[in-house]
Image (spheres, rainbow, N blue to C red):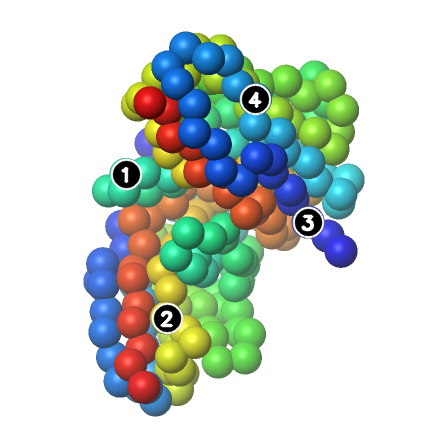
């Protein structure tokens, strides 16, 4: 059974810092890996999707990498802003089209 | 606008009173699923459906039922809700293309069972 761990669980940084959020998973037989953002009490917004054959994906200030063989993914946020404050979730997609979620990293960016 | 909608968004009910949470998507997606989110436990899949009339259990199916009679709709049914089903519920959908397809999530339904 897939298990997903995200480190750190919480992070508080001043505005402008570059950040790295880590995700590890136990079963490398995945189709893709998605990073989501969740604001308090709200739904999930997909940020990036990395296919299993890809190594990284970029969208604006966000860059996600995937090392499937070692079961790791990282989300890099450049020049963080207060509006980036949210919980970030990683989720590899496995058999049955099922996403398995990590516990998330709760990010606070202070002005 | 491409979206997944859920209704109701908030619901307070009592133990044993049957309820249905609706989910609808307008993207012609084959795949739909339900998750629940609980503090400390994260998001866990309840049921999923690969297409019309095809459903299967996820990680935590006990106490829930689903049906998929139309491609766009995937209701979640609690026949006899209990307090341990108090949670935040999300519906999601995607094309079943393996590897290339983003899963889209609804806004969530916050259910409280007294």
Residue toward you, A6 or B42: B42
**Relative horizontal placement of residue A15, taking residue B32 as reference (left or right):** left
Relative to B90, residue A92 above or below: below
Q: Tell me how far mark 3 sits from mark 4, CA to CA.
A: 20 Å
Q: Crowdedness of circle 1 by 10 Å Cα count: few (<14), some, many (20+)?
A: few
Relative to A11, residue A93 above or below: above
Q: Tell me how far mark 2 sits from mark 1, CA to CA.
A: 21 Å
Which badge, 4 or 1, is on the more N-terminal residue? 4
Residue toward you, B73 or A7: B73
Image coords of residue A12 (percent x, y): 23, 74
Relative to A55, residue B98 above or below: above
Q: Secondary structure at mark 2?
A: loop
Q: Are marks 3 and 1 in contact (CB under 8 Å)?
A: no
Q: Tell me how far mark 2 sits from mark 3, CA to CA.
A: 24 Å
User: Quick check: can you spot residue B78?
Assistant: yes
Res A18 → quadrant: bottom left
Identify residue for label 3: B3
Identify residue for label 4: B20
Q: Tell me how far mark 4 sits from mark 1, CA to CA.
A: 23 Å
Label 2: chain?
A: A
Residue in view at x 28 percent, y 38 percent: B41
Q: Crowdedness of circle 3 by 10 Å Cα count: few (<14), some, many (20+)?
A: some
Q: Are marks 3 and 1 on the same chain?
A: yes
Identify residue for label 2: A85
Image coords of residue A57 (percent x, y): 52, 69
Q: Tell me how far mark 4 sits from mark 2, CA to CA.
A: 33 Å
Give residue B41's mark: 1
Q: Are marks 2 and 1 in contact (CB under 8 Å)?
A: no
Residue in view at x 38 percent, y 65 percent: A86
Q: Nearer the viewer, mark 3 or mark 4?
A: 4
């Amino acid at each position: 059974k897939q298990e997903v761990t995200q480190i750190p669980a919480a992070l508080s940084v001043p505005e402008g810092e570059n950040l790295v959020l880590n995700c590890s998973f136990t079963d490398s037989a995945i189709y893709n890996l998605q990073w989501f953002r969740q604001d308090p009490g709200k739904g999930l917004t997909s940020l990036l999707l990395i296919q299993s054959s890809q190594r990284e994906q970029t969208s604006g200030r966000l860059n996600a990498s995937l090392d499937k063989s070692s079961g790791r993914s990282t989300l890099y946020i450049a020049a963080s802003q207060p509006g980036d404050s949210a919980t970030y979730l990683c989720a590899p997609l496995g058999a049955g089209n099922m996403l398995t979620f990590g516990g998330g990293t709760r990010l606070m960016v202070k002005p | 606008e491409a979206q997944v909608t859920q209704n109701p968004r908030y619901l307070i009910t009592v133990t044993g009173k049957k309820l249905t949470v609706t989910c609808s998507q307008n993207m012609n997606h084959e795949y739909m699923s339900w998750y629940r989110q609980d503090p400390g436990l994260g998001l866990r899949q309840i049921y999923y459906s690969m297409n019309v009339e095809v459903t299967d259990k996820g990680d935590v199916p006990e106490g829930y039922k689903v049906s998929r009679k139309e491609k766009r709709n995937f209701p979640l049914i609690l026949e006899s809700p209990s307090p341990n089903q108090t949670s935040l519920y999300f519906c999601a959908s995607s094309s079943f293309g393996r590897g290339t397809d983003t899963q889209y999530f609804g806004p969530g339904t916050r259910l409280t069972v007294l």
